[in-house]
Amino acid sequence: MKIGLDDYLCKHSGKDFPPFGTVYTIEEIELMIKGKKVTEVTEVTVSPEEIIQVCEFPLDVLSDELKKLVSKISTSIDISHEAVASIALTVLSACVGNTVRVSPKKDFYIAPFLWTAVVLPPGAGKSPTQELLVKPVKKMQSQAYLKYKKLMQEYEVKLNAFKKDKSNTTEQPEVPQMDQFYISDSTVEAMADVFESQPRGILNSQDELSGLILGLNQYKAQGNDKQHYLDLFNCNSWKIDRKGKSRFIPNTGMGIIGGIQPMVLIQVFGDDSFHDGFIQRFIFVCPESRPLRFSRENVSDEELTYWEDLLYWCFEITLEMNDSGFVKSKILTLSDGALNLWETFYNEYGQLATILPMKVSGFIPKLYLYSLKLAGLLHIIESFKKKNISPTINEKTIQDAINLTKYFFGQINKVLRLYSKKDELKEYQTRLSRVIHTLQGDVASGKLPLSKIVEGYNKELPTHAHLTSEKISNILSEELGLTTKKSTGNYSCLLWEDEKIKNLFRATVTTVTIPPEIKQGGVNEVTEVTDDFKENNESAFWNEQEIQEVEFMEEVETNV
């Protein structure tokens, strides 16, 4: 029998726990609970997958109106409701911004900004969903821009009058500022300009999150853009020092939403992200893959009215400033019952961190913060009904936020599985290996014609999924570590190096003996594709976008 969070930690919180990192059997723990000494420690295998439970998205934590909209968008775009709801909450977090802070105790204040990565393959519906939910924010930005253009025209007229006034009776006009609600430029300098004019914070909506992350320090050999992002998560002030110029930005804050392809994620969030705390600042949504289906359902303008009204109402929440230029947020405290629930959650997950690997336990301190952020957002959604923000978060809201946090903790489990598979062959690599295995009889003088490999790979694939000989040659040499050679007459071949070829087959292909009772035609052996290959190639369908993803991966790897 194995230990899980719900089986032990929740039942025995408050007891004396074993030293950090020590794992005991249930029998030994029962002895410790009774105060008896354990002389022999037997280690049990408790993997993070067994402790971190992957659970369904708790859709019932949302208001009836928002839940109805999420379901409608999910059906219309054919995307999971967990992706829709997570995108919606992130957009909402940026609209609320620094106007409120959640506080479980004195000097502990958390703004509700979410940083969310939606982990989906291309064409899974993330982009249209994000565009639909961000549309009201972009509409406000468009209106602000039109207003700004008009003010700039008036400014130019006044500035010309000022310059022509020799008597100095005309006051020099102030340069107008454009209201900021949304950005796509993620450079530190661009964001500093925005934060200076918009202390409530903004939304950063990225179709591809990888572009934002890979762009950090892109133009500087020794830049500190990533450090500014680490500070940004906590809404810390920025001090930016550039050659001959320094700036101080007292108020920062940003909600970040973007999609990322599963295998690109492990390239963009490298192992160093676990050490500097960067990856732990994101929450991840990893919906299960499912076949694409066309839906005739539409989301009408009337059905989006609730969403637009909610966001516009959030922008109307007053943001006050103190004399030093810092925001004075509305403080949302926890009721006694809510604080008791949150304290129990905090302590249980603190103990859980002692038996989890660093890559997992590093997420827990940030999940504490996310539970408060989510509580603040659910409180705002509930307050919208009454058009009044209560200063106290109740017990139900904090429990709903904890349930949401547990869901996102489970998604971390899915993210870590990607890292455990990063050394496995990709689908197209496995297909190549299988083709090479079937062509062993065509090897002559230690060479296998590349043309035969190309022919075998492209066989039965739709035309748009075919790979060129040059592409396949690059995959063989640069990704699979094999040797290709181009001879005179433009004849290309794969050099048959036994050890390298054996290692390749060992990863994908095994040979099994057929029992005598099912032998046919004198065949004694049959090639069997491993489980990894079968899982990835049960269907002959090959999506053109997957080929594009291969090319994108190469680009990412080069950039990294």
Image: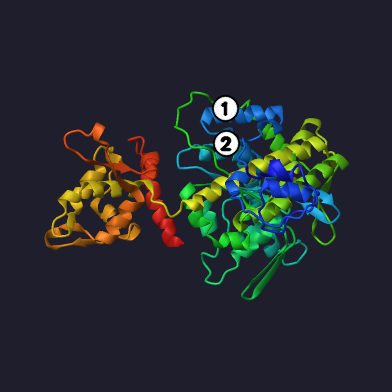
For the point 15% across and 50% down, the residue is 442
Looking at the rendered structure, the kind of residue marked 2 is Leu
Which quarter of the figure is the N terminus placed in? top right
Give the side of residue 11 with respect to residue 212, left or right: right
Q: Which mark is residue 299?
A: 1
- The answer to which of 276 and 75 lies nearer the viewer is 276
Residue projecting furthest to the front: 39
Label 2 vs label 1: CA separation?
A: 9 Å
For the point 72% across and 59% down, the residue is 19
Relative to 116, residue 501 above or below: below
For the point 34% across and 35% down, the residue is 541
Relative to 348, residue 299 above or below: above
Rendered location of residue 244, percent (x, y): 64, 76
Residue projecting furthest to the top: 296
- Determine which residue is flagged by label 2: 132
Circle 2 residues within 10 Å: few <14, some 14–19, many ≥20: few
